[in-house]
Amino acid sequence: MQNSEIVLIGGSGKTGGRIADRLEELGLNVRKASRSTIPAFNWEDRATWCDALTGATSAYVAFQPDLSVSWAAEAIEALSKLARECGLQHIVLLSGRGEDGAQRSEEALKAAGIDYTILRASWFCQNFSEGAFVEPLIAGRLELPAGDIKEPFTDADDIADAAVAAFTDIRHRNRIYELTGPRALTFREAVAEIAAAADRPIEYAQVSMADFKDGLAAAGIPEQIVALLEELFGEVLDGRNSEVMGGVTEILGRPARDFSQYVRETAATGLWSA
């Protein structure tokens, strides 16, 4: 591994940045690939793909905007075949739990003839601190079209640790891991834990999908992202992913990080303070 190079497609995202830090700490050669890097990587401009992959032996792939979009599986298939042609030996794919589009992308990767490790995850803990939920939480009220369905929120640090294990231990090749937290809770319960840790009132309100979409549109969120969130809240968040899975322990040999640990550590930074 010391003489190899790992390219991180989506290397500036919630998981990619964490993976880069960990690999660099191990002394491994890492290169991020995104629209803003040189060479650039753009999912919608395939002319950029070859330069971004050239010289690497492995890749981490976090597809944008989400594997549920209609063209994702074909893009993953094309990228995987190109990666093999460019000399890459292994792809670690961040996939989605319970998403038909994600499963199609997984099958496309497996059929490409390159070693793979598939990490399935759903909602991240960090959606509450590094995403669209942050500003409403700071303002004291989060409104989502989510009711009593429980979700075992996955910590992005666990996903990053799992990716590093996949890159550094050949035993994880050609395997699929379902990564979840150790406990399932509703969005309302998650916000209540955040409010308690932040020591301030933060309300949670369940709203209709129509009102939720109207709010997103008013905030200037692109149509494609609105449609994605509608699918995630309206279809995928139906209980299919509520079961706690043992993938974190299986790949890392330790328990998954609990949502409460994430909340305590994040609240200590003052992020959710009014």
Image (cartoon, grey):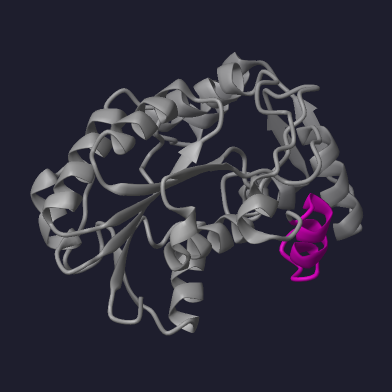
Q: Position of residue 233 (x, y in %)?
A: 60, 24
Q: Residue at x 65, y 55 (%)?
A: 129
Nearer to me, 177 or 151: 177
Whole-percent x and y of residue 145?
67, 23
Q: Which residues are magenta?
A: 257-274
x and y, in percent, of residue 152 in the image: 73, 38
User: Looking at the rendering, which quadrant does residue 32 occupy?
Assistant: bottom left
To which quarter of the image does residue 52 belong? bottom left
Q: For the point 71% across and 24% down, which residue is it?
A: 146
Which of these two is toward me, 118 or 145? Answer: 118
Residue 240 included in the magenta stretch of the image:
no
Q: Which quarter shows the C terminus?
A: bottom right
Locate the N terminus by quadrant: bottom left
**For the image shown, how many numbered marks are present on the structure?**
0
Compare residues 82 and 273 and report the one nearer the observer.
82
Look at the picture and state if 253 lies above or below 178.
below
Which residue is depicted at the point 48% across and 57% down?
A: 171
